[in-house]
Amino acid sequence: MLKRLIIAVFGIGLVLAFGSLVLAGTGRIGTLPNEDMSPHPNLNHPKVNVDAYDFDPTPAFKKPISAIKELPNGLNLPSPPSLVYFCDLQYYTGDLAYYWTIPDSYGDDLFNTRFTVEPNFNCTLKVAYFLVISDVQELGGPAGGWGTPDMRVYLWADDGFGFPGALLDSVDIPFASLPSFGYAAADFSAAGWVFSDGEEYHYGYTPIGGPGDTLAIISDDGLGPYAGDERSSEYWGAWGTMQDDWSGDFDYTFEILSERCCSEIPFSDCYTQNYFEPANLQGLFRAPHPSWGDSAWAMRFDVGGP
């Protein structure tokens, strides 16, 4: 009997040890069995068949640096946009260096940037500005080579993983209102969208038109002041950050700016004051006092503490 018990215990130990090795080999050490590490699917995605959605956030390969398009030497960058509502302007880009087209040879779409509201502030969204090229002649191409697409600008909530989640709003900019090379403005003020105290949202876009209709957006060199935050992402069969989808490990950030009116959240400090120390109990007072006639007691509190 003892021999069988020893064999059974030894067998169970081998199973547990083997199971531990299998788990360690998955690269998911510390991940709970029901924990979903992939970005959640965006059921409001305007161009994707949800049934065919790729849930794997890791691309099969990284797109080559050779496919990234540099801005031509001597191209004059436009001046920053004039603010419509004279509010705060938030952006994350560094030195501007590249342009990215939708469509491209990889089928990339919905270029976007994630914005974070500063702690202790409420911010009402006003205008999203995109530095775009709508006329390929700005890059030395033929007249009309990119067609005449309109531009649809999206506002998404964050999905909790740093990617676009629920689609909140959209604004269409007609081709006639787009600069050939400059800042396109999408006014979201009518809806009164408010984000508060560390909340995140995304602005992104796609061209609306026929086959071959193209719009380009400008990005920095991937070495800007917020490099490593992975704020800009794209849809390439699944959501992926620009750093993850492209070779070189550079954190390319799109030149998308958010004008918003912010106000500090009113501060309130609620707490309990108590001067009574039960450990130092000295006596008992009655009201009314049987000998002296005292009928009321009061305590003075100081708003400065304790």
Image (cartoon, rainbow, N blue to C red):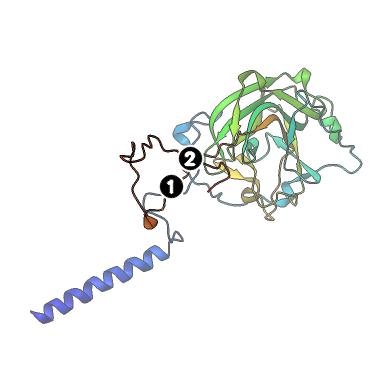
**Residue farthest to the front?**
291
**Amino acid tagged 2:** His
**Residue farthest to the right?**
74
State the image coordinates of residue 245 (x, y, percent, origin top left). 62, 48
**Do residues under tags 1 and 2 come within 8 Å of each other at their CB atoms?**
yes
Q: Is residue 256 visible?
A: yes
In the foreground, 25 or 94: 94
In the foreground, 121 or 80: 121
Quadrant that contains the N terminus: bottom left
**Amino acid tagged 1:** Asp
In the foreground, 62 or 16: 16
**The image quarter in which residue 45 lies:** top right
**The image quarter in which residue 168 lies:** top right
State the image coordinates of residue 154 (x, y, percent, origin top left). 62, 28
State the image coordinates of residue 200 (x, y, percent, origin top left). 59, 38
Counting other residues with Cα less than 10 Å from the Cα at mark 2, is it few (<14), some (14-19), or many (20 or more)?
some
Q: Secondary structure at mark 2?
A: loop
Determine the residue positioned at 74% across, 30% down: 129
Distance from the alpha carbon under mark 1 to that under mark 2: 8 Å
Q: Secondary structure at mark 1?
A: loop
Q: Is residue 6 above or below residue 223?
A: below
* Horizontal arrangement in the rendering, residue 253 relative to residue 303 (left or right): right
Q: Which residue is mark 2?
A: 40
* Horizontal arrangement in the rendering, residue 221 relative to residue 300 (left or right): right
Q: Which residue is mark 1?
A: 36
* Horizontal arrangement in the rendering, residue 301 relative to residue 216 (left or right): left
Determine the residue positioned at 64% across, 18% down: 190
* Horizontal arrangement in the rendering, residue 254 relative to residue 97 (left or right): left
